[in-house]
Amino acid sequence: MRRALAVFLIVACILAVCYGGFALYQHRLSSDVRPLLAAACADNISVNEIKSYLHDARPLLRTTKDRVTFQKLEHAITLLSSSQEYHDGFLDRMKAHMEDLQVGNENGECSGRWWRIVNKKLPGVQEAYNEMKECQKRRQEADDRDAKIAEADSQEGVRLYNEVRNTLGLPPLKQGLDTER
């Protein structure tokens, strides 16, 4: 009886030590992934280079910490890229708005009906003008909402990126990531 109890306690202690070691292992970055993530978080690196490092690191993920850190960095890059795409399209959106407001443009989204009525000297100019102003107001509200979303994405992306840098022992970036290279 004592012998069985002693064997049981020894096996329980061995299992507890093994489980504790495994739990500690899961809460650290593995030696294969750390250099790739550190390289992906280097100063003055482009988004394409980061995506390349992430692609290389994906099959090497072993621990929970590896996966969590990888997912944070991947999400940060997605947010920063989407914010940059919004800002890159700003001039195109402004050009489309200006073309819509061009004098005589009967095909415009907001001003088309108004110009058709004005050019044909039909009644209902005031209603069409009010409709055009409402359309422009809705478009401006949508643009403002999209700008706020892009700014929130940018801030969250920088926060996550700096969190990953902190996990890797790197100082946070003072300015945003260079997403244009």
Image (cartoon, rainbow, N blue to C red):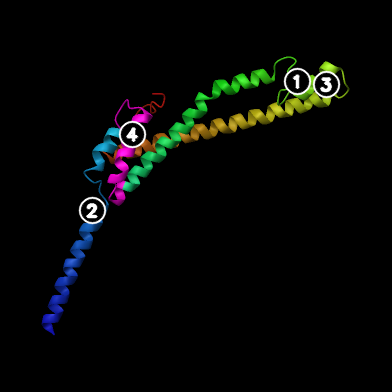
Vertically, is 136 above or below 55? above
**Dividing the picture into quarters, in which one does residue 129 lie?**
top right
The disc labelled 3 sits on which kind of residue?
Answer: Ile
The disc labelled 4 sits on which kind of residue?
Answer: Ser
Going from N to C along the chain, the mark reached first, 4 or 3, is 4
Q: Nearest to the eye among marks 4 and 3: give it.
A: 4
Disc number placed over residue 25 in the picture, else none: 2
Residue at the spot of label 4: 52
Residue at the spot of label 3: 117
Contact, CB < 8 Å: mark 4 with mark 3? Answer: no
Q: Nearest to the eye among marks 2 and 1: give it.
A: 1
Q: Say left or right for 123 vs 32.
A: right
Q: Quadrant of the N terminus?
A: bottom left
Residue at the spot of label 1: 106
User: Marks 4/3: CA distance?
Assistant: 55 Å
Q: Outermost residue, top direction? A: 103
Going from N to C along the chain, the mark reached first, 4 or 1, is 4
Q: Could you tell me which residue is drawn at 16 percent across and 74 percent down?
A: 9
